[in-house]
Image: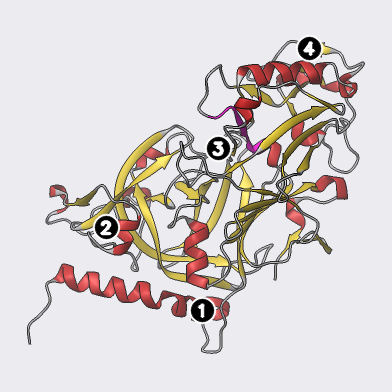
Amino acid sequence: MARLPSHRLAALLLLLLVVVSPCHAAAAAAGGGPRATRPKAVAMPVGRDGATRQYVATFQQRTPRVAVKAVVDLSGGATLWVDCDAAAGYASSSYAGVPCGSKPCRLVESPSCSYIASCLGSPPSPACLNRTCTGHAENTVTSSVGRGNVVTDVLSLPTTFPSAPVRQGPLATSPAFLFTCGPTSLTQGLAAGATGMASLSRARLALPAQLAGTFRFSRKFALCLPSVDAGVVVFGDARYVFDGMDHSNSLLYTPLITRTTDRSSEYFISLKRVVVDDRAVPLNATLLDVGTKLSTVSPYTVLETSIHEAVTRAFAASMATAGIPRVPAVAPFELCYDGSKVESSAITGEPAVPVVFELYVQSEARSKVAPWMVSGANLMARADGGALCLAVVDGGAAPETPVVIGGHMMEEILLVFDLEKSRLGFSPNLGAFGLSCSKFRLG
């Protein structure tokens, strides 16, 4: 009988694995028994790195399983990418290269096919595979791009939160989760211990779409970024319960919009006006029409210069800052106060600044707007020398996006990205209820 060439046999095996992976994933969930059912949702724990203010997710990957840390990237990147170099400690018996010309290769819009001379005669590894699809890995923190092989490997996530120890808690497993190998140099600028970036974008092979396809749940995920303790990303169909309080039906929603001038994988909402002390801040409406981006790699909210000046001026004159002594600006902020003169919340320990700052975004009813109430914890940031500063940054006179809502303004807020209905649900700061992201319960 004729034998298939080895690279064609590998392609056939990969195709079969991709086709049957949902069934295997279902069997792998909850212990892998024959009666196991697909999970309705899976969780990915998230922490905040104090040195970089980046949000770092943890998941299980490879065979045998190891914990992998990757920086959460809300709006960039086509796939998850990790450092696959053997020198970086990548070792697995279950990885497979994605063949050139295959459907997954076309979906990542592969620029080329890997044929690395240095790999000839060397032991294969994920980063060193010939006749393998290659893709782009992007470090959106440093705006750097690298190229690497597109491969698959086992990826596991807990079905409960807080998660039990990996050897005890139930895990849902994708046996052939696609990702891109990034070079070790691309990890520069990432939080300590992070070996890649976890893309939560709209892209067809980012985490939300791949997990939904594998486990057959809704293309939806909830993001709760921590300010101190644990946060979480929840993929799939879940009730959003925090310490016994269900917030699933108390969210406000705004449409997710797509800008034709940008990558469609990013998340934008329509900001209609900014209100301080119940008065609308005079802004150039044309700038707001561009769309407001949500970003987890921007530590703070970034505003075009004229918007920044108007918002800063309005807040300086607001009742929230009346009687609080000003102090010199502390980079990257421009409006700072004496933090010792500001009381802290007895519940959260965050600045007890009155809620005078509101973002009005387009509601699901096109003729109406929905208020995004920005609490003191999300509006003010502690800086060197005991200063307490308005946590917005001047983004220059001609940025690509006039308003970028950064991580600080989204902390301890439940954000639900419903990709099937193309909408974003948001809650008030959980601290208003004496809660935090760490109080979320799944399973």
Label 4: how many Cα within 10 Å (few below 14, some 14–19, many 20+) = some
Label 2: how many Cα within 10 Å (few below 14, some 14–19, many 20+) = some
Residue 143 position, x and y percent, is 43, 32
Question: Which callout, 1 or 2, points at the residue further toward the start of the chain?
Answer: 1
Point out the frontmost of discs 2 and 3: 3
Secondary structure beneath disc 3? loop
Secondary structure beneath disc 2? loop
Question: Which callout, 2 or 4, points at the residue further toward the start of the chain?
Answer: 2
> Label 4 belongs to which residue?
327
Q: In 3D space, how far apart are the residues under numbered discs 4 and 1 (Cα atoms)?
A: 58 Å
Q: Amino acid at mark 2?
A: Ser
Q: Nearer the viewer, residue 260 or 410?
A: 260
> Label 1 belongs to which residue?
26
Q: Which residues are magenta?
A: 401-408
Question: Which callout, 2 or 3, points at the residue further toward the start of the chain?
Answer: 2
Residue 121 position, x and y percent, is 12, 56
Q: In 3D space, how far apart are the residues under numbered discs 3 and 1 (Cα atoms)?
A: 33 Å
User: Label for residue 297?
Assistant: 3
